[in-house]
Image: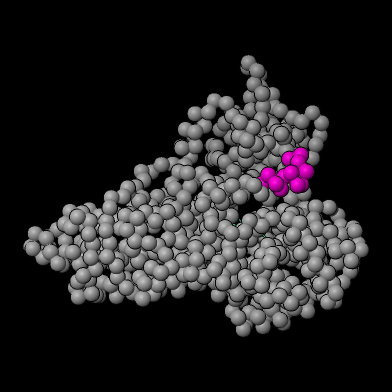
Amino acid sequence: MRYITTPIYYVNDVPHLGHAYTTIIGDTIARFYRLQGHETKFLTGTDEHGQKIEQAAKERKFTPKEYTDKISAEFKKLWDELKINYDIYARTTDEKHIAFVQAMFLKMWQKGDIYKDQYEGHYCISCESFFTKSQLINENCCPDCGKITTLLKEESYFFRLSNYQDKILKWYEEKDPILPKNKKNELINFIQNGLKDLSITRTSFDWGIKLPKEINDDKHIIYVWLDALFIYVSSLGSEKEKFWPAHIHLVGKDILRFHAIYWPAFLMSVDLPLPKFIGAHGWWTKEGEKMSKSKGNVIKPKEIADTYGIEAFRYFLLREVPFGNDGDFSENMLINRINAELSNEFGNLLNRIIGMSNKYNDGKISQNGILNLYKNELDEVMQYLKLAIDFLENLQCNRYLEEIFKALNVANLAISKYEPWNLIKENKQEQANALIGLCANILAKASILLSPVLPDSCQKVAKALDFEISKSNYEKLIINNELLDFMASPCEALFPKIEKINLESKQEIKKEEKAKIKIDDFAKLEIKVAKVIDCQNIEGSEKLLKFQLEFDNKEIRQVLSGIAKFYKAKDLIGKQVCVLSNLKKAKIFGHESDGMILSAKSGDKLVLISPEQIVENGSLIS
Ligand code: MSP
């Protein structure tokens, strides 16, 4: 039995590359276990309660439920479009989950693991996380995301996390559950600094699960992380006994602490077994910068998949960075990997096999002679493939793919080295046939192992060579090192070479095609009110003014605007302006500009657009 989970994603934002990365790793691992014949469940879903979501809904003038239904559906749609084969799509607003969380809370309470007290400290709404003053950075900012925290002073129920300190450390030592292994030490240090009891209820907002009625305290709602973590168990419903504990919880490095410290403590408190592994991956950046909506550099998975294909996208994400490391997204690297690896090493090998077998043998491919003539090549391939499996068991997807491609390279090199066309000329028919048999067997073995990453392409290979990607062939070809005969039939190129298409230019073309936009397109624009904190002329430019603008949470951004002919810099300080705030960053005249100030032009006149009354900085315009 194997149960694999992704984090459930917050619905305060639409899905981006980071979400797709975790989900694609999870999908790959789940497919791999299914291939091996394990009964497998793969969970993904959305995390829908908490202050952050309540705020996001309010800003957009939705009720929290309307808003969560909408964004949760967007996540689901994306996973369907990316052909993610999930078994459970879990939502924390499901009644079944709500009842389960209340039951677990009651169990912890009855056990004596929960007590009521006063909470005083700082809260990061973005991370939905509590901090003490000494943990904050830059005065009052969150040490994890850098955003400003809120000072909280409210009555709260606490979980006796401190009681579990030693038990968690013992679990690490005995079971070694953290992947990659080097992440364990950071956690041990954190725990050894002392675990404080955890505030697990809030009273200052409503959008969350109420305490169990047995506790009779209506003011409180349950802390969003306690609520969210239990989704992994609640979603199994009647299959809990069968699939719990999870085999792997996949998470990003930022939420490892919640999964590797709070979660095992909660589970121990309610007497449930602990997960086998928690795998923490790194973060993707774009050109070295953290992706964020305000910077306008968020990569949309669907756009890449539409431009380059779902499978090339999956391959790139898994191949490009070692599991646990951060990675930088580059379209050039993606194109290079498509051309050099998927097209040259993989797709082209299939074409060569089909071409040669049809030319010399009407498509028939036999295993005869392989073991006599090419045993060394076959042994080398099997070594790579066995290693690949070990790597994937440890979530090292990049090494997994690397080993499989080494195996494919053995086939490609054998063709160049033995030149079957010359063998035929020299009347060495048997050697030529065995060589084609060797290559087809290598390709089939590699395709079986590649199928969790490239399911559709590997199906095409299987169809073209007439074999099945199945558990029984996994056992035959990979575990027992057997060989097969094949019958080749024509097949379109698996990964045609890509000329450098630029995602941006493609988007430009799309834009031009549409004269009228839909309301969804308008929703892509984020227009906010900001206050001018400072405004200066730029030396050498008659047109440009350089603004320092204050948004919500006291975020300051520099924006350039070509209005120097119409306004004096100093007259604008203190005014509120309207800004397109999710525009890609640009450099103008050597100065960075992060947004666009809106103005109206009438003949020769130009006027800034301002709200009719003073509103909070960062207010959204819709
Ligand atoms: N809702 C919580 C998880 C609760 S699980 C019981 C949450 N949600 S999230 O939407 O903020 O983040 C989900 C996952 O996306 C995290 O694992 C996070 O690491 C990952 N990523 C978000 N941005 C990322 C990148 N730029 N790169 C890679 N992954 C990142 O946390």
In magenta, the rendered stretch is 59-71
Name the dominant secondary structure of the magenta segment: helix
Residue 499 x, y percent position in the rendering: 36, 43
Q: In which quarter of the image is the N terminus?
A: bottom right
**Which sits in the foreground, 23 or 581?**
23
Residue at point 45%, 43% (across, down): 307
Q: Residue furthest left?
A: 426
90 vs 368, left or right, is: right
Residue 46 x, y percent position in the rendering: 67, 54
434 vs 500, left or right, is: left
446 vs 17, left or right, is: left
Residue 268 x, y percent position in the rendering: 73, 76
Evaluate whether residue 503 shows in this view: yes
Q: Which residue lies furthest to the right in this view?
A: 216
**Which sits in the foreground, 123 or 109?**
109
Determine if the magenta segment contains residue 285: no
- Ligand number 1: quarter of image: bottom right
Determine if the magenta segment contains residue 64: yes
Whether residue 311 is situated above or below residue 29 in the rendered picture: above
Snapshot quadrant of residue 411: bottom left
Q: In which quarter of the image is the C terminus?
A: top right
Whether residue 549 is situated above or below residue 380 in the rendered picture: above
Evaluate whether residue 141 shows in this view: no
Whether residue 600 is situated above or below residue 160 in the rendered picture: above
Residue at point 72%, 35% (across, down): 621
Snapshot quadrant of residue 602: top right
Residue at point 54%, 40% (across, down): 587
Name the image colouring: one colour
